[in-house]
Amino acid sequence: MPLSPAPIPLLLMRLLFAAIAFLLACCAPLAQADAPAEIIAKAVLLDDKSEEQIALIRSGEPSPELLALLTLWKEGGIFLVEGPEGTKIPVTLEDAKDADDKQAARLLLTRQPYLGPDGKPIRLLASDLNAAETDSDLRSAMKSILDLAGLASPDRSARLQAVETLGMEQDPLRLPALRARISKETDSEIQHALKEAVALTELKDADPATVTLACRALGELGSIRSQDALRLLAKDGHPAARTAQDALRKIEQHLQTVNIWGTLFRGLSLGSVLLVAALGLAVTFGLMGVINMAHGEMIAVGAYTTYVVQCIFGPGLELSPFGIHIVLPSMKATGWLYDSYFLFAIPLSFLTAARAGVVLERCVIRFLYRRPLESLLATWGVSLVLQQLFRLTFGANNVQVASPNWLSGHWLINDVSLGWNRVFVIGFAAAIVLGVFLLLARTPLGLLMRAVMQNRTMAACMGVRTERVNLLTFGLGSGLAGLAGAFLSQIGNVGPSLGQSYIVDAFMTVVVGGVGSLFGTIFSALGIGMADQALQQILGNPVLGKILVLVGIILFLQWRPAGLFVTRSRSLDN
Amino acid sequence: MNPQPRREIFAAGALALLLLVLMPALNAWAPEDSFFYVSNFTINVWGKYLAYGILAISVDLLWGFTGLLSLGQALFFSLGGYMLGMHLMLMIGKLGQYKSDLPDFMVFLGHTFLPTFWRPFYSFGVTALLVFLVPMLLAKGFGYLAFRSRIKGVYFSILTQALTYGASLMFFRNDMLMGGNNGFTDFKFLLGGDMRSAATQRTLYICTGIALLAVYFGCRWLTRTKFGLIQRAIRDSETRVLFSGYSAANYKLFVFVVAAGIAALGGALYVPQVGIINPSEMTPDKSLEAVVWVAVGGRGTLVGPVLGAVVINALKSWATRAIPDMWLILLGSMFLLVVLFLPKGLISVPGLIRDFLQRHRKPASPETPAPTPAPKVSAS
């Protein structure tokens, strides 16, 4: 079958068209790119004819460039310089200043450097220049363009921000734009905010029926933001006063729900903090029966390790303990690499604290296994020494540990704010609890640990190297404390007495949970955390809440002297 | 009576003579430029040490003799101090900064009248009663709950630590009306005597010394009665005491309450001499510090704690001035070493040296009996 010659030119033609279309597509933005600058340049030159200026800036497509220029203008970043023959030329200044405080300038229109007649860039002094003027009409027009443009911004948080500002302005002129956006918006949270903004604006409506409807809508939405506006309505003799009161009541209910959930969440996260801090103690105190008063300092070791790692990733660190000068190198990392320091800090703080724990066990604790009260005293001595060492090495003040970016945001779910670091705390606590559980219950080492802790002598008789197991167990407990430190550095201050603020709570957690029971520790940590936050919420006073929790614990131990989960044994004492 | 206790009494008597008679006499009558003159500062500092000595005995009565390591003694100590402090605050009268009948901090907080619970403290007699009553009642309440549910050993320590911690949190608050963060200070008069005069301070010093002696002999008597025997039996094996039909909880409660009273007495004598009381005296750390004195001095004896309190505080006075950075390291490591290597404290050093010399003088007969079996100190 002979091939028809026609398809080939057709194909070529198509290819040609495609290429042209592609080129056009590439050029189109370039061709249009000048437009916003032109508009602004023209508008700037139309001095003191604000109506024309407003018409001009409204005429342009609200592209990001136009918006950026408008913002610049509004903030006084566009200047007019005298050109040849008395013309005025709009310019913007470069950021860098030289020794005389002078800055190079760029032409607004072409973005080219502003050159003098001799072809050299002219440097200008900002204070000598006249900023392009704006009057109040123009500024409000700019603001409305900017705000409305914000509604369509591709950035979610900018959009939310714009909706919220527009809502608070309660300007009826913005209603059409807001209403139009509702149908287009896909994000449910912004949709919610839009409805709220519309209703808020409608409160200013002259028609009482609309106002009543708006009040009802705000009540349904549980809008916390509109409380002030509604209170104003509810007070005066407005026909919608009753509806406003109803709406306020609904919002109050919503607020209560939010508070309850917020308290639950904070309680859960505080419980997780306690759990992380107490877990190491549950191993050393609960399983081994060693009262390690230096446990708090092991937490601080972890926190300071995090600090050092952060400094190495960032600006470097100079320490001079005891007159010895130590300079730690700096990686000068920025961006995601700097943010990843925490991922390195976590294992390192575990290892450092575990190593410190091993040294402590070898030097002090192994002599005191049969004298628990004395281990309390000796480790308190160690804790004093360590605290002072921190003070001498890192200074008596708190050091700054910056949270990585990926930990410093929050989710807002139905007005309950969930901080990412708190969510992270909860996840982290769950992860290490699982890790410890698996280690103790599913590995041969865990089996040996449990055997030695149950009956040291018997285990030794069976050929277990108890000394070694003790060492590893204590190392594990201290390492967990180090993990806790890495983690507490993200939500609190890091200072020499960091450990002291957690040690009492940690001991109480272990005692309430039942010494020797990891599950008990989990339950009591979460319970104490919840009780603490709930009491704080009810009493409105953190200290009083804490005292009540302590009293509650003492009374609780009346009821269950051995804690929540009792480890049964046949021995007479303990 | 075997020779060691008699020696102990002689040593205590000689020390008492030196501290109670000689030092105040030299302070009062020796000319200021003579070698023998004891300065007001020295008297004041030693008064503080002796008050600490009383606290140390209270710790030892619990820990050394009954095996209860209480970390709440600083609480009872400062409660006693606070009670007397309230009286002293009222005695300032209109001489305060605000020229008001109310204590300064109350005026500062905007109070216009004296709260009811402050009123009894106008009378010294009632104050003296409350100095003992309040801490002892607290001890009774807490001890009843703790001992009834058989909380012992380290659990008791941790619980008393929590109690102290909670109380200090409470006293740090302004609306407790106990001076908040700053506590009480700027005292002017005690029983009509000007608190800044040397004579008043000397009298206070002598009172502290007498109180210390009285506490010492009181505890000495108590620990030598049948009660003391049971006390030590509880320390060594509580279960056996229980099985022998004794109610260990009641014995422990009694000792706990007595020790609280002793600590409160120490606190009440301490406050007028240092001139300030604030909640930082109440922290668990302070309790632990008192435990250090006892451990270093020698627990299970009654001289040891006093010795420890004086030695460590003298060392502290010197070290916090001479080597402030190293003081905590010094204290911590000293404590560590004593616990590890000298479980019976400084008081056992002469005995250890004697044993050591005897062993080396007669290497042929290793079975030389120790001159006196020192009281057994066992783990609880």
Image (spheres, coloured by chain):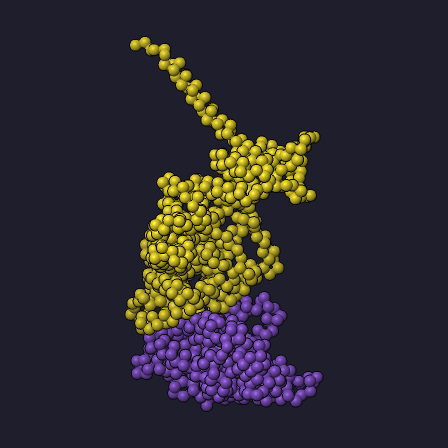
**Residue A335 falls left or right of residue A456:** right
Q: Residue at x 60, y 32 (%)?
A: A112
What is the x, y in percent for residue A538?
Answer: 38, 65
**Residue B192 falls left or right of residue A360:** right
B117 or A436, which lies in front?
B117
In the figure, the yellow chain has which letter? A
Q: Residue at x 37, y 39 (%)?
A: A184
Q: Residue furthest top?
A: A2
Q: Is residue A54 above or below residue A10?
A: below
Residue A22 quadrant: top left
Q: How many marks?
A: 0
What is the x, y in percent for residue A139?
Answer: 53, 43
**Picture quarter with the C terminus of chain A:** bottom left
Q: Residue at x 42, y 69 (%)?
A: A544
What is the x, y in percent for residue A419?
Answer: 42, 53
**Picture quarter with the N terminus of chain A:** top left
Chain B drawing hue: purple
Q: Is residue B222 above or below residue A425?
A: below
Residue A191 quadrant: top left
Q: Residue at x 69, y 85 (%)?
A: B32
A203 or A298, which lies in front?
A203
What is the x, y in percent for residue A481?
Answer: 43, 59
A45 or A487, which lies in front?
A45
Q: Is residue B121 above or below residue A196?
A: below
Residue A292 appears anywhere in the view: no
Residue A45 appears anywhere in the view: yes
Q: Residue furthest bottom?
A: B1
**Residue A98 falls left or right of residue B99:** right
A34 or B337, which lies in front?
A34
